[in-house]
Image: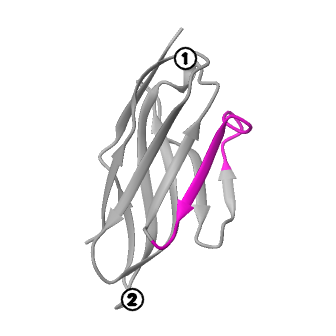
Amino acid sequence: QVQLVESGGGLVQAGGSLTLSCAASGNNFRINAMGWYRQAPGKQRELVATMTSGGTTNYADSVKGRFTISRDNAKNTVWLQMNSLKPEDTAVYYCNAKGFYWYGTAFDAWGQGTLVTVSS
């Protein structure tokens, strides 16, 4: 079973930066897309940024130009560099990975979440 472990959340002042990382572990799998979602209090979980194994990225409009997603396919690791953080970026950030096990079954795995708090 694929497991995702996130790190890098914390408290930062508005205008500051943070980098989140997420590493996938397990056996006999291939990841097609990895990315980040977030859920603020009282709101639904929303996409932040994703990247396919081929390097295609997708960003939420609210983070374009401020956040950058990067990935190491060989290490099954994805990062989210967050710059110019705003109080509205405060949320629990979840890592996500979608792919297939070698025997054909698809998976859609989530990390445990890491809290990012941006103070004004």
Label 2 packing within 10 angstroms: few (<14), some (14-19), many (20+): few
Residue carrying label 2: 104
Q: What kind of residue is marked 1?
A: Pro
Q: Report whether residue 5 is seen.
A: yes
Considering every residue shown, the one lying at the far bottom of the view is: 103
Residue shown at the point (50%, 48%) measured from the top left = 36
Q: Image quadrant of residue 105?
A: bottom left
Camera-side residue: 32 or 46?
Answer: 32
Which circle marks residue 87 in the picture? 1
The local crowd at label 1, few if under 14, some if 14 to 19, many if 20 or more residues have their Cα within 10 Å, is some
Magenta span of residues: 59-74
Q: Which residue is at a point 32% across and 84% down the rendered structure image?
A: 28
| In-front residue for pair 62/11 | 11
Q: Residue at x 36, y 63 (%)?
A: 24
Which residue appears farthest toward the top when viewing the image? 120
- Name the foreground residue: 109 vs 66: 66
- Mark 2 element type: loop
Split into 4 quadrants, where in the image is the N terminus? Answer: bottom left
- Label placed on residue 16: none
Q: Does residue 45 appear in the picture of this structure?
A: no
Q: Residue at x 41, y 45 (%)?
A: 94
**Magenta stretch: includes residue 66:** yes
Q: How is the image coloured?
A: one colour
Camera-near label (1 vs 2) is 1
Please give left or right for residue 82 compared with residue 57 in the image.
Answer: left
The answer to whether residue 119 is above or below residue 77 is above
- Residue 40 coordinates in the image, percent (x, y): 45, 28
